[in-house]
Image (cartoon, rainbow, N blue to C red):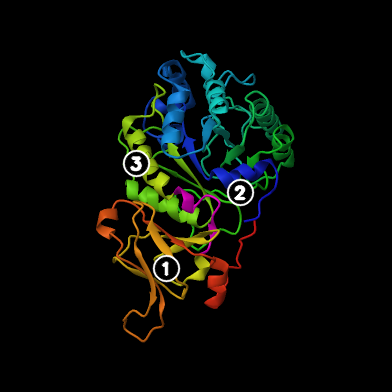
Amino acid sequence: MQRFNDGQDWFFEKRFGMFVHWGLYAVPAWHEQIQWRRPMAKADYVKLVDQFNPTAFDPDAWLDVLQGAGMEYICLTTKHHDGFCMWDTAFTDYKITNTPYGKDVLAMLAEACHRRGVRLCLYYSCPDWHHPNSINFGGDHQLDQPNPGDEPDLLKYVAYVKSQITELCTQFGEISAFFWDIPPKINIPELNATLRELQPGIMINDRGFGPGDYSTPERHVPTGKAFSSPTEACQSVGRQSWGYREDEDYFSDLHLMQSIDRTMAMGGNYLLNVGPKADGTIDDGNARILAEIGRWFRTVRESYYEARPASHLIKNDECLLTRKENSLYAHFPKPLMSSGVVLNPLTCQPRRATLLNTGAEVRATVETVPSWCRSEPYLRISRIPINQLSTEVPVIRLDFDDLDQALANAGGQDGNEYIF
């Protein structure tokens, strides 16, 4: 994989991050868009400011959960669609420092991240349901009508956004990525230019006021064997909400592992979201999910980092491949139907096959397997303990003495580098 050879290369090295949706909406604990989805009048929603007092917020506790899951960067919602700001901005009174809590939580998180070597990324919503000059850009997640007393004005609102992103890029140290949300369908190049001028190594996503550096598929993984450009898929641990929800329907650990594995085996990054409670803590259910994912992820991590997609080498749709040096990694994001699988048309014999989940060796031989039609000898992995792995994604490392030579001798070649 070709990198950018600059400060943006971190994006291809860190791969797994924590998304955090946190704001006033944690108080009613229903959905981060409760103001729009219920709906709630602005006059009623703003009363949540007086109830937001996250006295239990501890950024180091968040980062403990993050690192326990194997994550290496964090992305915080600095301003979601409701317009409430999670830092001490000078450009609105609608901010965390005007709550009973009174502290700048972004400053606290930034200090902890930089002290502990965790990359800090920032989310910022293009729509703003509070600011009087915000306009409806013609997209979704917009108020049906302006709030009473609003005066929509594109130039004034863009000036507000520029002032705020300037604060975010000058007051909190290094910012590794900027996650715009809800594409406004209007190109204003000066906004991304401001981000790049103030933070030269920043990665910018594709949901803002102009083209970005990477795409952000949400709640699903696109089909295919490899991404053709930098990609960061995002998903939440809960099915309904990104912010904290008291009565959430949580995804299974296996579903999230399958989503992570498929995304990363295709060459993408993964941003997994939790929604802290109104008191600032990550609840036990969210923390348990991340801990279990981390237990699995640490065992298979090597199959993603410094590895590149190699699924073009096989026709088997049960499996995805990644490659690192003289090793191929067989990923099974779909549940295995049997204890063995044939990797057609590979015919190179590995010297060893290791199930990363447990460290145990499995059998890997080039042989002819009986089927409904005549077949050639292909690489078969067998004696996989599928019943013991029913709650997680298996990944098997196939080690070769010289993989390039083995592929050449077998009449194949690993020539697809998926240049970004």
Task: Name the residue that disc number 2 marks.
Answer: 214
Q: Which mark is residue 292?
A: 3
* First in residue order: circle 1 vs circle 3: 3
Query: Horizontal placement of 33 versus 201: left or right?
Result: left
Alpha-carbon distance for marks 2 and 3? 28 Å
What residue type is disc 2 on?
Tyr
What residue type is disc 1 on?
Asp
**CB contact under 8 Å: marks 2 and 3:** no
Query: Horizontal placement of 311 versus 277: left or right?
Result: right
The image quadrant where one finds the C terminus is bottom right
Alpha-carbon distance for marks 1 and 2? 26 Å
Residue depicted at 35% across the width and 35% down the height: 286
Q: Quadrant of residue 363?
A: bottom left
Please tell me how crowded label 2 is: few (under 14), some (14-19), or many (20+) other residues with Cα within 10 Å: some
What residue type is disc 3 on?
Glu
> Where is residue 393 drawn, in percent x and y?
36, 54
Q: Quick one: which residue is furthest to the left in this view? A: 387
Q: Secondary structure at mark 3?
A: helix
Residues rendered magenta in the picture: 301-310
| Front residue of 130 and 349 | 349
Query: Horizontal placement of 203 versus 99: left or right?
Result: right
* First in residue order: circle 2 vs circle 3: 2
Please tell me how crowded label 1 is: few (under 14), some (14-19), or many (20+) other residues with Cα within 10 Å: few
Task: Name the residue that disc number 1 marks.
Answer: 317
Q: Quadrant of residue 367?
A: bottom left
* Residue 197 seen anywhere in this rendered image of the structure: yes
Q: Which mark is residue 286?
A: none
Q: Secondary structure at mark 1?
A: loop
